Amino acid sequence: METIIIIVFLVGYLAITLEHNLRIDKLIPALAMMAILWAIIALAHMPVFEVNAELKELEPSHLDEMLLHHLGKTAEILVFLLGAMTIVEIIDYFDGFATIKGYIKTKSKKKLLWLFSILAFILSAIIDNLTATIVLVTILQKVIRDRETRLWFAGLII
């Protein structure tokens, strides 16, 4: 059964890396791989949490609590990202980023670096760091057209 899981993972990973050649979004093979792997684990009654002997002696309710804890943390991150991306899409829908782009007149990399540093400082105080990063990278995409320069600035923002 472990061999099947490894094969499914490798095929899914290959599909994710070849997304441009296959003309599919990364999300499709990632979700399919996740669903298939969890289905195999569930249907084969594989011992997911048998890392040490102590876990074998736990009651099923303890395993449920552990699983709920880990799934809860994963769901928490996904819901948080969904909220952050919703904020960005709402701002973009109402042309908020175009307005900000209108205020940025400089093409100097040094001035842009200072501007994005100040924006990052202000946004980090107002909203959480992840949402601030998403907002700044979105503004960056509107302001800087050169891909290499944009990647350099995005690396500094992150």
Image: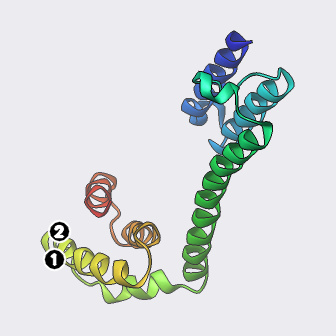
Residue 49 visible (yes or no): no
Say if 147 sits above or below 31 in the image: below
Q: Quadrant of the N terminus?
A: top right
Residue highlighted by disc 1: 111
Under mark 2, the amino acid is Lys
| Residue at 71% from the left image edge and 48% from the top image edge | 65
Q: Residues within 10 Å of mark 2 (few under 14, many from 20)?
A: few
The amino acid type found where label 1 is placed reads Lys
In the rendered image, residue 82, in percent from the top left (x then y), is placed at: 63, 65
- Are the two marked residues, 1 and 2, in contact with CB atoms closer than 8 angstroms? yes
x, y percentage for residue 55? 65, 29
Q: Nearer the viewer, residue 77 or 154?
A: 77
In the rendered image, which quarter is residue 137 located in? Answer: bottom left
CA gap, disc 1 and disc 2: 6 Å
Closer to us: 35 or 74: 74
Q: Position of residue 45 (x, y in %)?
A: 82, 23
Q: Quadrant of residue 21?
A: top right
Residue at (47, 71) in percent of width and height: 131
**Quick one: label 1, few (<14), some, or many (20+) residues within 10 Å?**
few
